[in-house]
């Protein structure tokens, strides 16, 4: 029982990083209705910008984190311009494939600039794990969880209580109607992309600094963890992204403990497959699916 | 031919069709009118299985088709056109008509793969004959998406007719057309689509209705408010009210 | 030496073409699959087991691999084919990753001539030696690859002109309208997924025997997404589209050695720009329609 609870706690800590990745994903998807496969790779580039700042200037944690976020946002803008803005509406597949080839491009740029593949990434804190009764917590995990919680609250405020948030919700509900209301849809999409990239940048910093190292493969990892967490929670739903991320973390932690490391990803994909077949809307998104079905059945 | 009993269909609490009863006899051509949102297209959608009825029954030749899939309903002899045009834009005009034959009886697995048999040649000849009849023969190799709107409506008509349906549902066949084009379309439907089959026509243009229909049915808020010979129906007070508003009727 | 290099590249182009055609077929019915590599993998293992462990002849091993891949596709298709859009894509991704991760732990070995043969989890599956044991040269094997590719391609070209091919394109453009032509869309989609599985399977079986060694990590999602990209680069209007995509990527850029280290930087940028101008690829439906019109015109002019 103690093991099970400890696994749940570990899973929630791990899951909070997945949740951050999924929030970025779901923001972009909610507004664009297109999948950005380059999401992981662009925050991976951000993390390498952080590495560069560390290697060149021996900068402190705050500067590295800032560099990571700025790098992720700049690359995010590049992806938005090239793969989303420039491709006309209705060509969602083209956008997706375009974001995939840009992923390949980003990965190769990173391997050209950083030929050693694996680089040391400075941890944000160095402290011993904290014991609490029979359970223990790693400090970096607690920080990760706290930052994820704060950012979620921040995002909630932004979406629910600001004019920009209202515009963003209007665009994700119905871009055409939003356009007729005088909302600058392009600008809203652009800003959503920037916010999502910033979220991704923070997530990247937290995850990579907890790992203590970075490789170009982080891009693939981040895209797929974010995608799975988003799908589990329900596409386009922010609470869904958080719940999906936590669920994914807990399931992975339990599988590692009870089945072994090699079953970690297998159980995650198995869970995803079951969800898609039996509850494609995920934890929160059933309504969204029905709306989409209604739209495709519209005659 | 078609009998509808107690049909109900609502969308999220809003009733699009309420307790609708309707019977259409063999060979009858019925006009279906009503203000926007009165449930006309919903009725077509329920008949063809695109939407499921909440309650009530739809019978085609006394056979229940209420819970059937669109594909099966179409194979039982119903064809339709669409108010907001649906054609395969990335296919040629000729292909758009040809594809409607895929599920005709006699098109088996072999015919799906080969197009050299005598039967297949006959089917292609039928496609060309229909394109000729609707006046699209000279543009049969054009991509359908590039046709002007009146021609797209003619193409939809040809596609519906190639299956020789027993019941033809036309949803605003002259929508968006000029008066001259409307008259042309009305003549085309009268001479070519109507003979030998049962038709229901949704249309706002009364001259088209009066050219084609012996019977007119009026829907408002999903209910039938009048049904009968066109001249009389149009004088019915509830119909005038639905179209012109209460004040106009009282004045 | 150079000849061997050329034969290897050409053989690779041939084998990847199968998986590209497989992803293309699903793009035609309007579905994006991230998971065609799963059928490639299932067939690579299946045919390898058949020839190396059960001692079946090569041709039977290839056939078996394709059939196993088709059966696997049927198993995926039945629960997932009703899912639309991104849901289907992610379901195929989840399935393919499951297949890869199962091969990471799948061990099935027998002793042949004092040596253990068979898949050994993440260490892979060695010694699929059937073509070397029967003295097929690299060149001859390349001819086998292209022979089979030609057969599949002719199948696609027949399909394109047939009613069945039209049904696939109809579903890709408007499933509801297709249903309204009296066609059971679900049934035809399952058929398309199974056909795509078989096509990918042929490629996988050929791959296993040329490489003689397969390991699970080859069949990662990168393979599947590349396959997808090829169709969209070359164009969705014709089965030559994916082949053009493969040839551009592997052929052209691999052969220009000067940029081989920067291949994806150049290629990625080029493709991104191409997709802005032509979102359905070089030879899209409109382009093919135009070309066919010109072709008809030429024939008429000659008569």
Image (cartoon, rainbow, N blue to C red):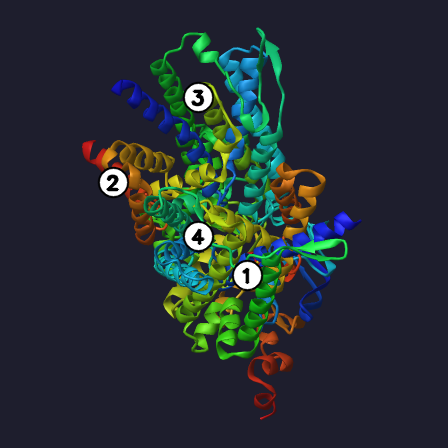
Q: Earlier in the sequence, mark 3 or mark 2?
A: 3
- For label 3, count other residues whose C-alpha is less than 10 Å away and answer few (under 14), some (14-19) or many (20+): few
Measure how far apart labels 1 and 4 are at the Cα level: 16 Å
Q: Secondary structure at mark 1?
A: helix
Q: Nearer the viewer, residue A97 or A46?
A: A46
> Which residue is situated farthest in the left direction here?
C302
Tags 3 and 1 on a common chain: no
3D distance between C-alphas at marks 1 and 2: 51 Å
Q: Residues within 10 Å of mark 4 (few under 14, many from 20)?
A: many
Q: Mark 1 or mark 4, which has the lower sequence index? A: 1
C232 with respect to A175 (left or right): left
Disc 1 with disc 2 on a shared chain: no
Which of these two is toward me, B216 or C51? C51
Please say if A47 is above or below C133: below
Q: Where is mark 3, residue-wise?
A: C211
Q: From this viewpoint, which residue is outermost toward the right?
A: A1
Is there one chain holding both mark 3 and mark 2? yes
Residue shown at 62% from the left, 64% from the top: A239
Q: Which residue is mark 4?
A: A44
Q: Are marks 1 and 2 in contact (CB under 8 Å)?
A: no
Mark 1 or mark 2, which is nearer to you? 1
Numbered badge on residue C294: 2
User: What mark, if any, has residue A23 been given in the picture?
Assistant: 1
Nearer the camera: disc 1 or disc 4: 4
Secondary element type, mark 4: helix
């Amino acid at each position: 029982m103690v093991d099970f609870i400890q696994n749940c706690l570990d899973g929630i800590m791990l899951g909070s990083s997945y949740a951050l990745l999924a929030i970025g994903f779901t923001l972009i998807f909610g507004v664009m209705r297109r999948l950005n496969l380059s999401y992981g790779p662009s925050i991976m580039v951000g993390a390498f910008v952080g590495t560069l700042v560390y290697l060149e200037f021996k900068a402190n944690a705050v500067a590295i984190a800032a560099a990571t976020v700025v790098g992720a946002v700049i690359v995010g803008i590049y992806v938005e311009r090239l793969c989303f803005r420039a491709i006309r509406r209705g060509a969602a597949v083209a956008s997706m494939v375009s974001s995939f080839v840009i992923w390949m491009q980003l990965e190769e740029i990173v391997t050209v600039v950083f030929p050693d593949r694996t680089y040391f990434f400075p941890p944000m804190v160095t402290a011993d794990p904290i014991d609490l009764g029979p359970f223990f917590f790693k400090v970096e995990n607690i920080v990760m969880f706290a930052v994820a919680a704060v950012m979620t609250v921040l995002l909630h405020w932004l979406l629910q209580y600001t004019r920009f948030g209202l515009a963003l919700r209007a665009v994700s509900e119905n871009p055409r109607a939003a356009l007729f209301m005088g909302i600058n849809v392009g600008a809203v999409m652009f800003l959503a992309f920037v916010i999502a990239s910033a979220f991704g940048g923070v997530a990247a910093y937290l995850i990579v600094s907890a790992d203590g190292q970075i490789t170009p493969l982080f891009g693939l990892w981040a895209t797929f963890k974010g995608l799975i967490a988003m799908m589990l929670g329900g596409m386009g739903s922010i609470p869904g992204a958080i719940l999906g991320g936590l669920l994914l973390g807990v399931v992975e932690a339990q599988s590692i403990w009870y089945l072994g490391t090699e079953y970690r990803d297998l159980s995650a994909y198995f869970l995803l497959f079951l969800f898609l077949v039996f509850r494609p809307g995920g934890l929160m998104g059933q309504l969204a699916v029905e709306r989409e079905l209604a739209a495709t059945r519209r005659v | 031919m078609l009998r509808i009993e107690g049909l109900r269909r609502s969308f999220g609490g809003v009733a699009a069709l309420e307790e609708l009863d309707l019977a259409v006899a063999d060979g009858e051509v019925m006009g279906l009118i009503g203000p926007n949102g009165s449930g006309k297209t919903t009725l077509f959608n329920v008949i063809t299985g695109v939407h499921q009825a909440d309650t009530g029954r739809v019978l085609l030749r006394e056979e229940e088709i209420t819970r059937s899939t669109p594909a099966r309903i179409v194979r039982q002899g119903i064809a339709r056109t669409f108010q907001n045009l649906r054609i395969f834009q990335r296919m040629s005009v000729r292909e758009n008509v040809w594809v409607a034959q895929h599920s005709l009886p006699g098109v088996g697995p072999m015919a799906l793969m080969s197009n050299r048999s005598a039967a297949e040649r006959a089917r292609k000849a039928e496609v060309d004959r229909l394109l000729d009849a609707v006046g699209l023969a000279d543009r049969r190799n054009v991509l359908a998406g590039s046709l002007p709107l009146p021609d797209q409506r003619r193409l939809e008509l040809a596609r519906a007719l190639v299956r020789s349906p027993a019941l033809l549902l036309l949803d605003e066949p002259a929508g968006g057309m000029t008066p001259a084009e409307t008259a042309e379309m009305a003549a085309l439907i009268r001479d070519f689509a109507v003979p030998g089959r049962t038709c229901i026509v949704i249309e706002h243009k009364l001259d088209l209705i009066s050219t084609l229909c012996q019977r007119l049915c009026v829907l408002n808020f999903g209910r039938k408010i009048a049904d009968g010979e066109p001249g009389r129906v149009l004088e019915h007070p509830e119909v005038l009210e639905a179209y012109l508003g209460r004040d106009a009727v009282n004045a | 030496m150079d000849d061997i290099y050329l034969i290897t590249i050409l053989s690779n182009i041939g084998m990847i073409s199968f998986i590209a055609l497989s992803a293309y077929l699903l793009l035609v019915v309007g579905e994006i699959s991230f998971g065609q590599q799963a059928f490639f993998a299932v067939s690579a293992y299946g045919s390898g087991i058949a020839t190396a462990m059960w001692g079946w002849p090569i041709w039977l091993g290839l056939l078996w691999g394709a059939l196993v891949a088709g059966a696997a596709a049927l198993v995926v298709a039945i629960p997932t084919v009703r899912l639309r859009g991104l849901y289907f894509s992610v379901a195929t991704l989840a399935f393919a990753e499951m297949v890869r991760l199962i091969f990471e732990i799948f061990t099935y070995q027998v002793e042949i001539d004092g040596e253990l043969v068979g898949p050994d989890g993440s260490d892979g599956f060695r010694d699929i030696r059937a073509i070397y044991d029967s003295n097929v040269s690299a060149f001859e094997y390349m001819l086998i690859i292209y022979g089979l590719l030609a057969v599949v391609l002719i199948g696609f070209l027949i399909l394109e002109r047939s009613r069945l091919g039209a049904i696939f394109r109809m579903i890709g453009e408007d499933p509801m309208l297709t249903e309204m032509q009296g066609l059971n869309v679900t049934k035809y989609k399952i058929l398309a997924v199974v056909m795509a599985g078989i096509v990918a399977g042929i490629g996988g079986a050929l791959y296993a025997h040329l490489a003689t060694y397969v390991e699970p990590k080859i069949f990662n999602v990168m393979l599947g997404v590349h396959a997808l990209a090829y169709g969209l680069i070359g164009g969705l209007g014709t089965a030559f589209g994916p082949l053009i995509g493969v040839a551009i990527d592997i052929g052209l850029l691999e052969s220009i050695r000067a940029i081989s280290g920067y291949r994806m930087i150049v290629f990625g940028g080029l493709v991104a720009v191409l997709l802005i101008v032509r979102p359905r690829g070089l030879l899209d439906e409109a382009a093919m329609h135009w070309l066919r019109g010109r072709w008809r015109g030429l024939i008429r002019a000659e008569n």
